[in-house]
């Protein structure tokens, strides 16, 4: 094999590998079981996803220093207000680096209607696959399967339709 043909073979292999990676990245992930996680809310509740089985639940990882998270919160509050009576729920998980007093002050100021959980030891973030960036959102269907994993801003209209399909 000549040097030129070796370069073409290596280039072809690299191109094929790149195409495979891009295809896997763009292909929607199949549903997978939501992890077992214990949420400690600001109101002192201890809840698990198993206790919320039978209804769609949005898990939103956020931080008080995350501008897109703060911009998204009023939209999530509206989504919650509209769909909670039909059985939808939201648990917003404050990242471990967020000071609890700051989380409490912000959520009280915004009058956040849904559950807020502190993740002081990163146990919840770790259970959901080592979540490190915010906003990161998961939609868990009534059967306990993760059917959406979104990093970054949400397409709220699409999310609303998906949630309504479970109600």
Image (tube, rainbow, N blue to C red):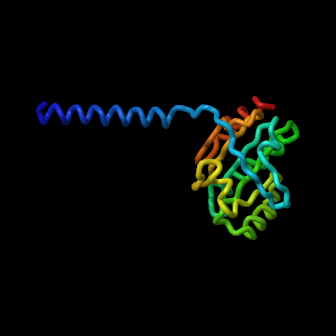
Left or right relative to 13: residue 1: left
Name above or below for residue 137 compared with residue 3: below
Q: Quadrant of the C terminus?
A: top right
How far across and down, in percent of the image, does residue 130 sit? Answer: 59, 52
Q: Quadrant of residue 98?
A: bottom right
Q: Which residue occupies the extreme front position in the image?
A: 36
How far across and down, in percent of the image, does residue 9 sit? Answer: 23, 32
Q: Quadrant of residue 166?
A: top right
Q: Quadrant of the N terminus?
A: top left
Name above or below for residue 126 compared with residue 138: below
Q: What residue is at 68 percent from the left and 57 percent from the top?
A: 70
Q: Quadrant of residue 121?
A: bottom right
Any part of residue 71 in sight: no
Q: What residue is at 67 percent from the left and 37 percent from the top?
A: 33
Q: What residue is at 85 percent from the left and 56 percent from the top?
A: 45
**Which is nearer the eye, 113 or 132?**
132
How far across and down, in percent of the image, does residue 53 sit? Answer: 80, 38
Left or right relative to 143: residue 85: right
How far across and down, in percent of the image, does residue 22 sit? Answer: 44, 36
**Which is nearer the eye, 4 or 164?**
4
Q: What residue is at 37 percent from the left and 36 percent from the top?
A: 18
Name above or below for residue 30 compared with residue 92: above
Any part of residue 40 in sight: yes
Q: Which residue occupies the extreme left position in the image?
A: 2
Number of marks drawn: 0
């Amino acid at each position: 094999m000549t040097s030129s043909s070796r370069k073409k073979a290596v280039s072809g292999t690299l191109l094929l590998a790149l195409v495979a990676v891009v295809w896997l990245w763009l292909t929607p992930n199949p549903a997978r079981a939501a992890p077992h996680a214990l949420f400690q809310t600001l109101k002192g509740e201890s809840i698990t996803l198993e206790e919320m089985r039978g209804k769609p639940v949005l898990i939103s990882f956020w931080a008080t220093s995350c501008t897109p998270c703060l911009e998204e919160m009023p939209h999530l509050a509206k989504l919650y207000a509209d769909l909670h009576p039909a059985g939808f729920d939201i648990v917003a998980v404050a990242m471990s680096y967020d000071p609890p007093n700051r989380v409490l002050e912000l959520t009280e100021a915004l009058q956040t209607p849904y559950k807020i959980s502190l993740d002081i030891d990163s146990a919840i973030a770790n259970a959901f696959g080592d979540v490190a960036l915010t906003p990161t959102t998961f939609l868990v269907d009534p059967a306990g399967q993760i059917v959406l994993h979104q990093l970054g801003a949400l397409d709220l209209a699409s999310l609303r339709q998906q949630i309504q399909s479970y109600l």
